[in-house]
Every structure is written in C-alpha cells, then in structure tokens.
Image (cartoon, coloured by chain):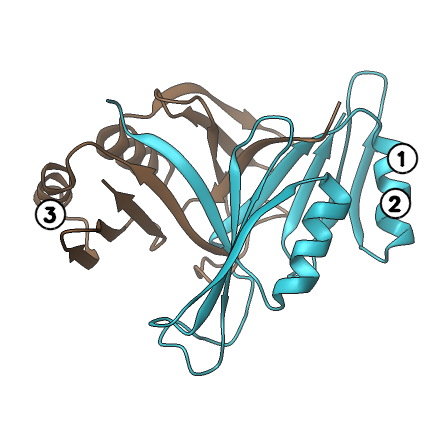
Chain colours: A brown, B cyan
C-alpha cells in the first residue's frame, strides 16, 4: 500500500470553542472526543460531511508535556473549505464574530479568508 | 452541497527540500508548482497516491506581504500518514537525516513521530 495521508491535527486553545467553529461554520461532523492520560490532552476528530477527510483538534492542558504557550506561528499556513455560497458563509462568519481577513469577489474568482478561534487562517472558496 | 474540506496548506522554508521530503518519505505525487505574483510566493500541490487528499506547500519570499520570520509555532499540531511497514519508513527517515522524535512499538500499537524539514511533527502509524 502507498502511504495514506490520514488526517491533519491542529492545536486548539479551547476544545469546545473550536468544535463549535468547525461544526457550525463548515458543517463538519464530530466523530469522537476523548482524553489521553499520558499527554494530559484532549483529542476531537471531525470529518467533512462532503468528503470525510478528518481534521483532528488537539488540546493540551497546562500540566501536559506537550503544553506550550499558544502562538499560532508559521507551521500551518491555512485550511481550505469549498462552499456553495460564499456570501452566505461570510455573513454567518460575521454574525458569529469571526474576523474576515481578505475578501475577493471578481467575475473569475470568489474566495475569502476568515480567522478561526485560534487565530488560524481558513480559506473559503466558492 | 455540504462544505468540502479541500486541502491543508503548510508553510515551508525551502520549497525543493519540502517537496523532496513529502515525495520521498510518503510517496506523495507532485501535481503542480507555480508562482503567485501578488504574494511573491510559490505554491506546490502534493497528493497522497493512496487517497488523493492534497497537501499544499506555501512558500513566501522575503519581499512578500505574507513573509514573516519562520517559527513553527502552535498552529499546526501534526500531519499523519499511515504506512505498511513502520520499521522500513523509520530506517529511511534516519538514513535521510530526519529526526525521529518518538517511537512506540508495542503489541497493540506501532507509531512514531518524525520531523519534517520545517520542524513540523509528522506522525507515522502502521
């Protein structure tokens, strides 16, 4: 078998807030949520209902060996979601208080970036 | 249509070095590579030959509005690849000079973390 790109895990500052963001904004489905004793962390697995690729949310409490002060840094560049209606999605983002970082609406290209609750850039393309 | 999780983009310090890492270590296929004038950046799209989910590599040169000094930070937690033979993959990683960060081989669980050329954690599960 060729190696399978299985999921991507992003660190979150608050598990419930991030689950709410990805399930409400992008209709991802929460598949599971559990604690890991050795890392004093929590993990939640979300999948896109459209194609099933998992986004894992990783939370580390202060006593965890993996805990460090959260700074978004340059590890991730962005996540990308494709939607039917950019305007509707952006209206929802603004209503829910998520920062819109860029917005491009021309005849040939319609996309925007919004910020997730952890300060990560999330691209939305129509 | 439900929103589709389309790809994940990670920032890289050196495009060729990162393309080499992901194509050699995880047999990802390079689908395209292009420059973007407005961002003074480069983008490469890789897909896992097993399932096709794209990993985008994002590079910004020093004159780019998106350029900042690279520090891996906490935005990404890790990427995960599933392989047939963990020992073989780890031997290859060591031979190629990639740091192995953790290695767990028990009867019930076989996984490890290695570091990519940008200091990102990459999990390998068997």
Look at discs 2 and 3 and give the one toward the viewer: 2
Q: Which residue carries the number 2 mark?
A: B92
Q: Which quadrant: the N terminus of chain B? A: top left
> Secondary structure beneath disc 2?
helix
Q: Are marks 3 and 1 in contact (CB under 8 Å)?
A: no
Look at discs 3 and 1 and give the one toward the viewer: 1
Tag 2 subunit:
B
Q: CA distance from mark 2 to mark 1?
A: 6 Å
Q: Which of the numbered marks, if any, corresponds to residue B88? A: 1
- Label 3 crowd (10 A; few <14 / some 14-19 / many >=20): few
Query: In the image, is A102 to the left or to the right of A79?
Result: left
Which residue is located at x 61 percent, y 35 percent?
B48
Query: In the image, is A119 to the left or to the right of B84?
Result: left
Q: Which residue carries the number 3 mark?
A: A94
Outermost residue toward the front? A108
Q: Position of residue B63 (x, y in %)?
A: 43, 83
Which residue is located at x 27 percent, y 37 percent?
A21
> Secondary structure beneath disc 1?
helix
Q: Nearer the viewer, residue A19 or A89?
A: A89
């Amino acid at each position: 078998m060729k190696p399978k790109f299985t999921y991507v895990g992003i660190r979150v500052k608050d598990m419930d807030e991030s689950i709410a963001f990805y399930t409400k904004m992008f209709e991802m489905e929460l598949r599971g949520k559990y604690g890991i004793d050795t890392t004093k962390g929590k993990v939640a697995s979300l999948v896109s209902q459209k194609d099933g690729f998992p986004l894992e949310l990783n939370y580390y409490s202060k006593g965890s060996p993996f805990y460090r002060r959260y700074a978004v840094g340059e590890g991730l560049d962005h996540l990308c979601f494709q939607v039917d209606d950019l305007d509707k999605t952006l209206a929802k983002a603004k209503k829910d208080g998520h920062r819109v970082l860029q917005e491009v609406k021309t005849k040939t290209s319609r996309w925007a970036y919004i910020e997730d609750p952890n300060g990560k850039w999330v691209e939305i393309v129509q």
